[in-house]
Image (spheres, rainbow, N blue to C red):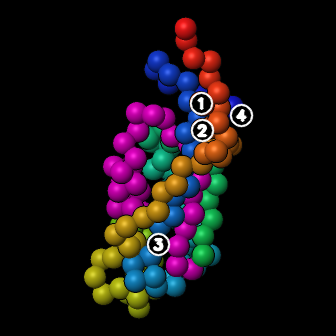
């Protein structure tokens, strides 16, 4: 496992982010998926966040990202959704008008899950087995 450093800390924080289209409309094509990947990756790079993996289906996308501890996750996600929605609606306007009559693309909510190499049981056991000071 490769650790990263930032300011006064060493870390390895990865997140699995799932974004779903508004009303779960199946409007993401292969071309839109490629556009979203490029747009979101550029946005993440500006915030010093690494996109480790990206893929999706016709109604949602998956991102695996690595971020530093000082990142405000909810603000970054909101920024990703706002910018990518605006750009995809601009680039694919005539196609997306079939699905949305208002300026929508993403569902309001999202799913974010922390990831890691160890299960909670392994971490819990490791903490329990620490040597108690005298």
Q: Which residue is mark 1?
A: 127
Q: What element does badge 1 sit on?
A: helix
**Dot 1 crowding, Cα within 10 Å, few <14, some 14–19, many 20+:** few
Question: Where does the image place residue 100, in percent across and percent down from the top left?
Answer: 35, 85
Q: What element does badge 4 sit on?
A: loop
In the depicted structure, whether residue 133 falls above or below residue 119: above
Badge 1 vs badge 3, beta-carbon distance below 8 Å? no
Q: What element does badge 3 sit on?
A: strand
Q: Which residue is mark 2?
A: 124
Magenta residues (range): 58-84
Could you give the CA–CA distance between mark 1 and mark 3, rounded to whole angstroms? 36 Å
Could you give the CA–CA distance between mark 4 and mark 3, rounded to whole angstroms? 30 Å
Q: Which residue is mark 3?
A: 20
Is residue 97 rendered to the left or right of residue 18?
Answer: left
Q: Which residue is mark 4?
A: 1
Badge 2 vs badge 3, beta-carbon distance below 8 Å? no
């Amino acid at each position: 496992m490769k650790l990263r450093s930032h300011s006064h800390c060493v870390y390895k924080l990865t997140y699995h982010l799932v974004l779903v289209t508004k009303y779960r409309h199946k409007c993401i094509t292969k071309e839109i998926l490629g556009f979203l990947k490029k747009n979101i990756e550029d946005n993440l790079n500006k915030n010093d966040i690494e996109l480790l993996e990206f893929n999706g289906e016709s109604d949602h996308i998956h991102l695996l990202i690595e971020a530093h501890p000082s990142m405000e996750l909810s603000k970054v996600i909101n920024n990703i959704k706002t910018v990518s929605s605006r750009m995809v609606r601009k680039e694919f306007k005539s196609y997306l008008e079939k699905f949305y009559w208002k300026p929508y693309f993403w569902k309001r909510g999202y799913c974010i899950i922390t990831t890691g190499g160890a299960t909670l049981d392994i971490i819990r056991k490791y903490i329990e087995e620490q040597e108690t000071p005298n």
